[in-house]
Image: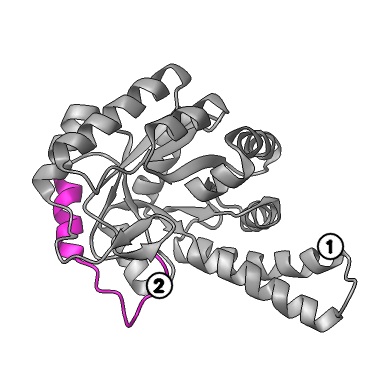
């Protein structure tokens, strides 16, 4: 699996009217649950580690079980580095067999954003690794950063210029989504999404999927979103399920017994999101 394969998957999703769901994992247990759910749904997916996971486990270990999982998966599976602010971390993950990385320099001015993206593109090219960038800002507070300002929308001219100067493989766009749980109904700017999609031919990504209503996700897909990121609901389901199962069984529980139940709970959430993205049966 490499970035060229991912480019084909995103093109196929665009032509087929669905999106490739990308799920964030914390460790091997939710990683396996996500992959198993995708296999059972017959769906192509991406599975992503954020920078805290990479720092905690190591790019070498994450890369190793990512590579092993991609080799044995029964569906198209792409291991991805999500929301890295560091060119160096992108380079580490590229060297450790990640076929896809994201460099998020959206907090900087456009010129600096372009500079960082080009640095990662140069590192990725010899390995045929797919590179995702971001224009505009994803609201909210979380692992990926903290943005509360009002000027979060992607500017069409900025998206055009970044793509022109970097030839980046995919682009996350700020249209009103947020990391974490939403306070009230998310207000997505579909008009801006449509404008960006018409202006550039690059696959578009929507972050902050948790909490966006199904109808809005599917509308965004119809207007150009080819990849949908889902993270918060995965790790919250994971930890809440662990607590509930430990409380149920009491002291001295065996790891595999507890995690078999936890995995099934995670798989239910993953399957629901695969169907929301209309990716079921598309492997």
Q: Is residue 14 left or right of residue 66?
A: left
Dot placed on the residue nearer the N-terminal end, 1 or 2: 2
According to the image, label 1 marks what residue? 255
Seen from the viewer's position, the closer of residues 222 and 156 is 156
Who's the residue at 35% across and 47% down the image? 14
Q: Quadrant of residue 129?
A: top left
The residue pinned by badge 2 equals 214
**How far apart in space, not on screen, are marks 1 and 2 (Cα)?**
34 Å
Which residue is depicted at the point 35% across and 28% down? 120
Q: Given this view, does label 1 or label 2 mark the residue nearer the observer? A: 1
Under tag 2, what secondary structure? helix
Identity of the residue drawn at 24% across and 68% down:
188
- CB atoms of marks 1 and 2 within 8 Å: no
At label 1, counting other C-alpha atoms closer than 10 Å, the crowd grade (few under 14, some 14-19, many 20 or more) is few
Q: Which residues are magenta?
A: 179-199
In the figure, is residue 106 to the left or right of 39? left
Q: Residue at x 45, y 40 (%)?
A: 9
Query: Does residue 117 show up magenta in the picture?
Result: no
Spot occupied by residue 84 in the image (x, y as percentages of width and height): 41, 43
Of helix, strand and loop, which one carries label 1?
helix
Residue 136 picture location, percent across and down: 21, 53
- 130, 239: nearer the viewer: 239
Q: Is residue 145 left or right of residue 200?
A: right
Query: Dividing the picture into quarters, in which one does residue 71 lie?
Result: top right
Q: Count of labels shown?
A: 2
Q: Is residue 197 magenta?
A: yes
Residue 268 visible to the viewer: no
């Amino acid at each position: 699996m490499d970035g060229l394969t991912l480019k084909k998957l995103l093109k196929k999703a665009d032509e087929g009217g669905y999106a490739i769901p990308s799920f964030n994992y914390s460790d091997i247990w939710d990683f396996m649950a996500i992959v198993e759910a995708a296999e059972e749904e017959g769906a192509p997916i991406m599975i992503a580690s954020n920078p805290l996971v990479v720092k905690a486990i190591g790019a070498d270990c994450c890369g190793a079980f990512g590579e092993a999982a991609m080799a044995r998966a029964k569906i198209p599976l792409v291991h991805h580095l999500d929301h890295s602010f560091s060119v160096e971390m992108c380079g580490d993950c590229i060297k450790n067999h990640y076929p896809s990385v994201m460099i998020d320099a959206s907090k900087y001015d456009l010129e600096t954003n372009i500079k960082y993206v080009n640095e990662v593109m140069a590192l990725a090219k010899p390995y045929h690794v797919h590179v995702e960038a971001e224009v505009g800002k994803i609201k909210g507070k979380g692992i990926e950063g903290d943005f509360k300002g009002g000027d979060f929308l992607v500017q069409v001219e900025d998206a055009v210029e970044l793509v022109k100067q970097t030839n980046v493989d995919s682009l996350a766009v700020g249209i009103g989504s947020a990391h974490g749980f939403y306070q009230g109904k998310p207000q997505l700017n579909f008009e801006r999404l449509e404008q960006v999609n018409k202006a550039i031919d690059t696959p578009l990504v929507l972050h902050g999927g948790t909490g966006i209503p199904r109808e809005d996700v599917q509308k965004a897909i119809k207007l150009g979103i080819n990849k949908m990121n889902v993270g918060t609901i995965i790790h919250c389901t994971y930890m809440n399920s662990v607590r509930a199962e430990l409380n149920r069984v009491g002291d001295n529980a065996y790891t595999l017994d507890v995690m078999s139940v936890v995995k099934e709970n995670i798989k239910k959430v993953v399957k629901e999101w695969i169907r929301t993205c209309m990716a079921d049966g598309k492997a």
